[in-house]
Amino acid sequence: MQMGDKIRNAREDLDLSQRDMSKLIPMNQSNYSKIERNVQEPSIEQLRRICQILKLDPRYLLNLDNFEYISQSDLKLLHNAKEFIKNNK
């Protein structure tokens, strides 16, 4: 399951609309919709807010347990996720 699908499922479980989420993050509703449709990835700050609002572990959204090959962009993402987790304990 892709990140946007996980976010959409969690949002629907909490009976929140895309408009509600976009206001809480805050961001444009159209861009939020793109995240749920897996067209656009959230920024680190948007990801942090989404995880806070939906009470999700960022490791779950980022599939951090499924790496077979770690590229430079994956390493940067891992670093950012580690910092996020450290700052939100």
Image (cartoon, grey):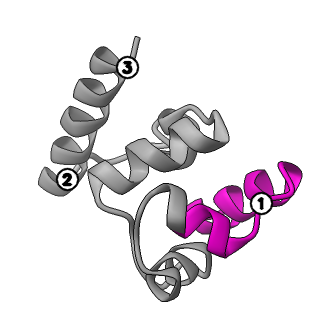
Asked if marks 1 and 2 touch (Cβ < 8 Å), the reply is no
Mark 3 and mark 2 residues within 8 Å of each other at the beta carbon:
no
What secondary structure is marked by label 1? loop
Provide the residue designation for mark 2: 71
Residue at the spot of label 3: 88
Magenta stretch in the rendered image: 1-22
Determine which residue is flagged by label 1: 16
The label shown at residue 72 is: none
| Prevailing secondary structure of the magenta residues | helix
- Distance (Cα) linking label 3 and label 2: 26 Å
Q: Is residue 37 visible?
A: yes
- Which quadrant is the C terminus positioned in? top left
Q: Residue at x 69, y 66 (%)?
A: 5
Give the residue type that dot 1 points to: Leu
Whether 28 is drawn above or below 7: the answer is: below
- Give coordinates of residue 10: x percent, y percent: 76, 51
Q: Which residue type carries mark 3?
A: Asn
Residue lying at the far top of the rendered structure = 89
Tell which of 15 and 60 is nearer to you. 15
Q: Is residue 17 left or right of residue 60?
A: right
